Structures are given as C-alpha cells and as structure tokens.
Image (cartoon, rainbow, N blue to C red):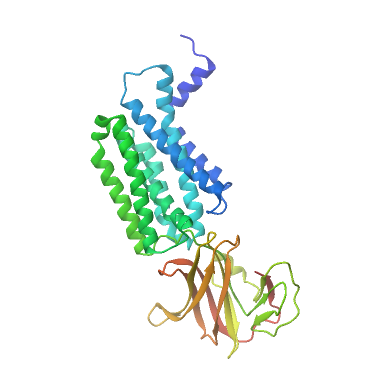
Amino acid sequence: MLKTPITAWLHTLKAYERHISAAAMAGGFAFDDFTYGRVDRPVTQTLLIVYLGMAALSIVALHWLEAHQEWQSKFVVKLRGLLPALTQFMLGSLWSAFLVFYARSGVLAASWPFLLVLAAIFIGNEVFKQYHARLIFTTTLFFFALISYAAFMVPVFTHTIGEITFLGSGVAAVTVFAGFLWLLNKLSRAKLGEVKWQIAFGALAVYTTITVLYFLNVLPPLPLAMQNSGVYHSLCRVPPKGRIKCIGEESKPLARTAGLYYRGLEEPPSWTVWLGVPPVVHVAPGEQVVVFGAVFAPISLDTMTYHVWQRYDDKTGTWKTVQRVDNFLRGGREKGYRGFSLKSDPRPGLWRVDFETVDGRLIGRTVFTVQRGPAPAALESVIL
C-alpha cells in the first residue's frame, strides 16, 4: 500500500510521539510567556480554567480509549497517539503560568519546587512509557496543577490571605480531584482499579509536600507580588493637589501629574550591582535611609504587610532584626500599592529589608550596604 504524504507524516508523528509531547509542552511555556498579565484578570482566569479542563478531558479520553482496546479504527489509533501530546501541552501551559506568577511573587529561590516539577515532567515524558505508569504520572501532575491553581485563585475570589485561606484552597483542590477520579472510575472501574492506590499515594504526597512547603514559608505568597523596591536618601510624595510631603529633604516645588507619584533620590548604582553585589548607601551621622516598595494585590484584597529591617552580624554570621514596621496594602493597582519605611542613623554594615505578609511569608527583599560618609553630590532622581 502506497503512503500518501499525509499518512507518512502521521506515521512519523507516531514514531516520535514522546519527543513531540516534550516539544508540545515547551511550546506551552513559550506561548504563555507572552500571554499572562495580572492574576485577577478574567482573561487569565479563563485561560487557566480552559487549560485545566482540556488537561482533564484529554486524560479522561485516553483512559476511555485504553479501556476499549477492541476499537482499532485508524482514527482511534491516531487519536490515542495524539492525546498524550495534548495532555502535555496543557500541563506545560499550566506550569509556565505558575512559573510566571510564582516567580513574580517573593524571591525567585522560593519557586524551586515548581522547577523540580518541570524537570520531572520532562523526565517522566521519556521514562513512563506504559499506559498505567503514564496514567499515574499525569493524574498526579493534574492534581498538582489543581492545588497550585487553587493556592493563588482562592485568595483572589475570597479577598483574603493566610493559613485558613490556604487550607481552604487545599480542600477545594481535593474536592475537584475526587470528582475527577469518580469520572474515571465510572468510565472504567477495572482500569482505574489497577492503579487507584498509586494515584491516591501520589496525590497525598503532592498535598503533603505543598502544605509542608507553605508552613515552612518556602512557597511565595501568591497572589501578592513585589513590583518595585529600592533604597533612597530621600523620598517625596507628590499628590495631584495639596501639600508635597518629603522625607530627607525640604518640601520643594515638583511637577504635578494627574495621579499620585513618589520621587526618590538614590546614589548612582555601581556596575557591580549587575553582578549581584548590594548597592552602597552613604549615610552621614544623624541622617536616615528610606526603603520604598510597591506590592501588587488583586482588587478588593486589603491586608497588612510588614517591612522588617535586619542588619547582618559579622560576629555571629546571622541577621538581626532591628525594627518591624507596619505597612497597609490595598489591592487593585496595576503597578502595586506603594509604601515606605525609614531607619534613622543606621549603623554601617550589610542591611536588608524584608517585605512580609501577616503570616510571615516573604514577598520581596531589598539588600544594601551602609557606609559612613556624606552622600554623593550628584544623586539620581527616580519616579516611583
């Protein structure tokens, strides 16, 4: 029988099914890098729900086809070969979205669990070749997607953050996953029965891991996200009308705009800052430094955050908390709700200011070095 170009192409797809699945997942990453904006936007929510729904549908469809091996038409054979690629594409799109949002929230190092999951997906794509192993793996990853989604979307809908909200998001994910397993069981009790305990163990391991990481303050505090932060010699609050208020310098005429803005004066950064070296701030005796931060929160999510000032103790090799400043946060502003705190006459040395939630989770961090001496004559003006 002669092969047409189309049938030859489909035969090639079948031969490289596992490699195509990995490429499809990578395609999902690239696509979502250009797609996502704010976590509380309807478009973002719709996309994530569609990805979750399509991932669930492709797993269910493949489970149904594997339970009916007697169906051997050309269409079914091709569909059975392409469904794993569809599952991987949808899961890949979800992981890229989670990486985007979790990387924005808190320090990047806190997102390491998701990097491990992404590596596991690539490895699993090559290792788990048998259907039963694939069903266990993809179903467990689907539950990971559910709980990851719920962890930052439940706060968006409830307008709350904290331990109770996080535990509630876990309950929501478990409830949806239980319904998903019920559907798989209805379609083929025998097929699911062969691996149900492995799936239950995998889901339990995922739930336990995420919960432990949360209470160890490893997971970023989504849906909060650090938008901007820095250390300044002075800071002016410039409203559209009324008095301009400044810290570190006398109030002076500044250009007014239609909206409120802040103007900070900072030292010109050294090229070493690009290598990760903390910037240097020169402070004369009796003067102060001001740390500014803008934290994004979804609309209607109002909460308290804290600026925690810490100085590195060279003798003990630990960070010592010097002061903890309350900072109210109101959600909804695209570039984050702005706030600041100051420290008068800071001692020379290495300093950092942690931006924390009410339950102590890290949103962001500003690190700098204080040196004694007058500030440079030419300070740079920064609009915040």
Q: Is residue 321 above or below residue 276?
A: below
Residue 96 in view (yes/no): yes
Number of disc labels? 0
Which residue is at the front of the view, 222 or 133? 222
Q: Please provide percent x and percent y for residue 88.
A: 43, 38
Vertically, is 104 above or below 244?
Answer: above
Side of 196 where 358 appears, left or right: right
212 with respect to 300 (left or right): left
Image coordinates for residue 72, horizontal then vertical, percent: 36, 17
Q: Whole-percent x and y of residue 202?
A: 29, 46
Q: Quadrant of residue 345?
A: bottom right
Q: Residue at x 64, y 86 (%)?
A: 374
- The quarter holding residue 111 reads bottom left
When asked about the image quadrant of residue 31, the answer is top right
Q: Position of residue 115 (x, y in %)?
A: 42, 52
Q: Which residue sits at x=43%, y=25%?
A: 79
Q: Looking at the image, which residue is at 42% across and 52% down?
A: 150
Question: In the rendered view, does 34 fall on the left or right side of 220?
Answer: right
* 249 or 326, nearer to the observer: 326
**Quadrant, the C terminus:** bottom right
Single out the residue that lies furthest toward the bottom: 286
Q: Is residue 313 visible?
A: no
Would you say 44 lies left or right of 357 here? Answer: right
Can you say whether 112 is above or below 367 in the image? above
